[in-house]
Image: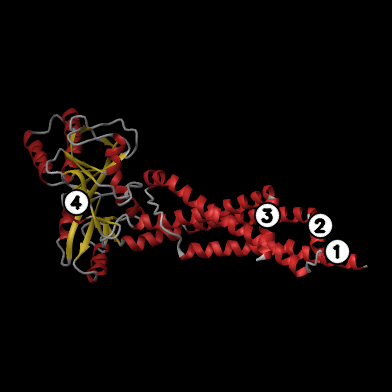
Amino acid sequence: MILLKLATKSLLNRRASVLLSLLTIAISVMLLLTIERVRMQAKESFAATVSGTDLIVGARTGDIQLLLASVFRIGHMNNGVSWQSYQDISTKRGIKWALPLSLGDTHKGYAVLGTTGDYFTHFQYGKKQHLSFSAGVPFANNNDVVLGAEVAKRLGYDLGDNIVVAHGMGKTSFHHHDDKPLTVVGILAATGTPVDKTLHVPLIAIDQLHGAETQQAEHLHAEHHDDEHDQEHLVDLVGEPKQISAFLLGFDSPLYTLQVRRNINNYKPEPLMAIMPGVTLRELWGMLAMVEKLLLLFSVVVLVVSLLGMLTTLLANLSQRRRELAILRSVGAKPWHIFSLMSMESLLISLLGTTFGVALCYLLLTLAQPQLQAQAGINIDLQGISSYELMLIAVIMAAAWIVGLIPAIRAYFYSLHDGMSVKT
């Protein structure tokens, strides 16, 4: 108890240098915990983007490319899936539901997704949570559109507003479907997934928008087409789409998943592939393992630099404290008392620095939470410290204490030498 009081008073007496040591440890703890929290939450957010979906089916391409394009709206589909193949596969035994997806258009940088009304019933995210509406209803007509929460908030749209879709996946487009405005009939509740950044339209509306372009091109460049051919094209437009980008499948039982996947991968009419979202996500994180290691290495380097800074400060102060140590020895303090005092000081510095670092970590996450949600779709949960994070904190405190033992050992030998000098 006496040593603790002495250590506290000693630290307060050297508060300027101690504060510098505290800040270096706090910053390293903040960076390490923040990077680890964002990394873990990013994994969870990606995994929570789609749940309850057993297979994603698309044209034959890379597994990760299909996942990113169909679920995360990242990248492009090289080829599509014919409507006939979709109908054939979706009626196979064991399939509970099928959701067609048609991508390729945007509105002010946000993806436009063509699908059916079943999307709002069967699509799930997080822990098998269903989509819900904050306002309005699902689309019912070909010119209806349902907005994701972020689209409505960022662009200031409300029910009844008209919007114009642009062709292509970029923020800047030179081809707008001005002759086919869409009316907002629903706004989805926030999900923390790419759904929030998506405009949902009836599947046939995508074909109608592009069909209008095809008809105009045919009228300008192929006026010799007869009326019967044009009539057949129009009937095809208002009936069923010719092609979709991909589709999602859910099964009555997981036992059907592998069998149907194998059948789709060997599908004869056209080259298709089926992926399991969970397995492909693990492959994705496996590819990003090097990035994770680099982030962890960066955090460790910052921690090591901080500990070296603390060690330098303590050693510099030690040479200035020779007189203080000599006075303690003159009043009866033993060398092991000096060693314990210095060890106690380093332990207090590491404890206070770590506590301050945890507080800074939560402050930083609180401030960055809205931006991470809006820009990267990463939902940061400001929950309590996990067991893994507690282990990291314990390792940091132990490392700081071990570093603090170096000046404590030197002080021990100083006190021995000063004690021998006093005796002689």
Amino acid on which the number 3 mark rests in the picture: Leu
Earlier-in-chain disc, 1 versus 4: 4
Q: Which residue position is annotated with label 3?
A: 11
Amino acid on which the number 1 mark rests in the picture: Asp
Q: Residues within 10 Å of mark 1 (few under 14, many from 20)?
A: many
Amino acid on which the number 2 mark rests in the picture: Arg
Q: Which residue position is annotated with label 2?
A: 322
Q: Is residue 222 above or below residue 194?
A: above
Where is residue 383 shown, x and y percent of the image? 41, 57
Q: Which residue position is annotated with label 4?
A: 120
What number is the disc on residue 418? 1
Q: Nearer the viewer, residue 383 or 222?
A: 383
Q: Is residue 396 left or right of residue 58?
A: right
| Labelled pair 2, 1 in contact (Cβ < 8 Å) | yes
Q: Kindly report the distance in space between the C-alpha atoms of the residues bearing marks 1 and 4.
A: 80 Å
Where is residue 287 shown, x and y percent of the image? 45, 58
Q: Kindly report the distance in space between the C-alpha atoms of the residues bearing marks 3 and 1.
A: 23 Å
Earlier-in-chain disc, 2 versus 4: 4
Q: Kindly report the distance in space between the C-alpha atoms of the residues bearing marks 2 and 1.
A: 9 Å
Earlier-in-chain disc, 2 versus 1: 2
| Labelled pair 2, 3 in contact (Cβ < 8 Å) | no
